[in-house]
Amino acid sequence: MTFSGFIEPDRTLEALDDPAAKLGIQIYSGYRAVGAAGFLGGQNRIFDRIVTKLQQLNLKYEDQCTGQYYFDLVRTLRDLNGGYDRVAEVGVFMGGSSTFLAGCMEPFEFDLDMIDIHARFLQFAYERVRRLYPEQAARVRLFHGDLPSYVRHVMMKEEGHGYIVHHDGAHDFNQVVKDMASLYYVRESLVAIIAQDTHLRGPIRHMNFVDLALYAVFGTDLKYAAIGASFGANTALTEPNQYEGNYFMPDTPEGLVLPMSANEFRYPHPALSIDDFLPPEASSNGLACTPFAQLERGEEIRRATKTTRSSVAVQTISLQRRNRSLGQSAVSAAGRARSGAHRHVKAGLLSVRIWC
Ligand SMILES: C[S@@+](CC[C@H](N)C(=O)[O-])C[C@H]1O[C@@H](n2cnc3c(N)ncnc32)[C@H](O)[C@@H]1O
């Protein structure tokens, strides 16, 4: 499977009752933002129509943003209507934001590119959107890769578009800086950036600093509009959770909208190239090397591999070259890796098997 390129929708999902099961996507909380529709209803016809469709959708999924956030997303697209003709959505998971973006395609006349480093989330989100808006599906493309790759391979090549970038992909400071910095190379076609989880913090290994990455790239005099929910102090959501230890900062907005007419890039230096922000390039046999930063639980793995990173990377690449199918023999080869690298090589292989 191509990494850093468009992929085709998986048509076998269309007939299935439970596409998540086939794709191996585990639904943990089952949280659905549509539950918030009650108090948000009656203010925006386009949002109401999306909610009505969602209420009729017979599909197992979960969302990751608040109902208020999705409401504000629709409102933001309405406010910027006419200035853009393409939305690039970075980080789709099970299609929560995709659903609301797709519901705006027809009224606000734009095409949607969905971007994710995990193909199975792209496939699921597409299938959710297709079931809701079959008439719009042909205007939705799936890009398997990260934002810098999309900038390099799509935005820099397909000129003449006005873009809104919706960012809910990586949350760690380093990758969000790379993502935002890559947009420097297409700044003329960028109308606005919408960033989610700007209130998120967690254990230091996750480096959840989306808001600070925005400041790193656009300066401390960032101009933005706050969107979504914010939570008061001393609520369950502002305390570290039992799973990953993540939490929301009190009284801090869930998302920010950055109009690009009011902001400018303070990073990168013009001497840098878009290629400086890309993940490791394809190896000589055409298979993508495994970027450790992009594994499913990337932060943990990257931190843990710091001391062994080069040996792990070399080992994984050589396994890729030896064994294109990356089946059982590659996994057992990983098992023979020296103990410090063992777990991480296995994690790397899991990811390689997903991507190649
Ligand atoms: C928080 S979820 C997105 C939630 C979704 N927007 C919603 O409304 O429910 C994050 C998604 O970003 C993807 N992701 C993580 N790192 C990424 C990266 N560097 N580039 C693109 N996508 C990434 C993950 O695979 C996951 O699907």
Image (cartoon, rainbow, N blue to C red):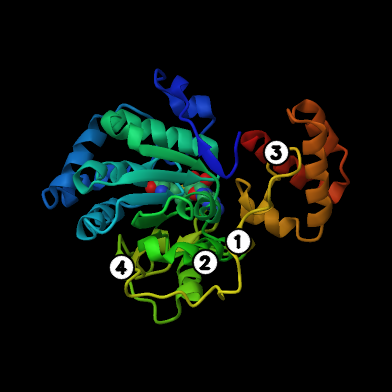
- Kind of residue at badge 2: Ala
Gap in Å between the C-alphas at discs 4 and 3? 41 Å
Asked whether the beta carbons under mark 1 and mark 2 sit within 8 Å of each other, the answer is yes
Q: Which residue is mark 3?
A: 287
Disc on the earlier residue, 3 or 2: 2
Residue sitting at 46 percent across and 43 percent down?
93
Q: Determine the CA span between mark 1 and mark 2.
A: 8 Å
Q: Which residue is mark 4?
A: 226
Q: Is residue 208 left or right of residue 330?
A: left
Q: Position of residue 349 (x, y in %)?
A: 72, 38
Please name the amino acid that badge 1 sits on: Phe
Quarter of the image containing the N terminus?
A: top right
Instruction: Name the residue carrying label 1.
Output: 277
Q: Is residue 350 visible?
A: yes
Disc 3/disc 1 C-alpha distance (Å)? 19 Å
Disc 3 crowd rating (10 Å Cα; few below 14, some 14-19, many 20+) is: some
Q: Nearer the viewer, mark 2 or mark 4?
A: 2
Residue 115: give x, y in percent of width and height.
47, 46
Q: Secondary structure at mark 1?
A: helix
Q: Residues within 10 Å of mark 1 (few under 14, many from 20)?
A: some
CA gap, disc 3 and disc 2: 26 Å
- Residue that mark 2 sits on: 181
Q: Report crowding for label 4: few under 14, some 14 to 19, many 20 or more residues within 10 A (C-alpha).
A: some
Mark 1 / mark 2, whichever is N-terminal: 2
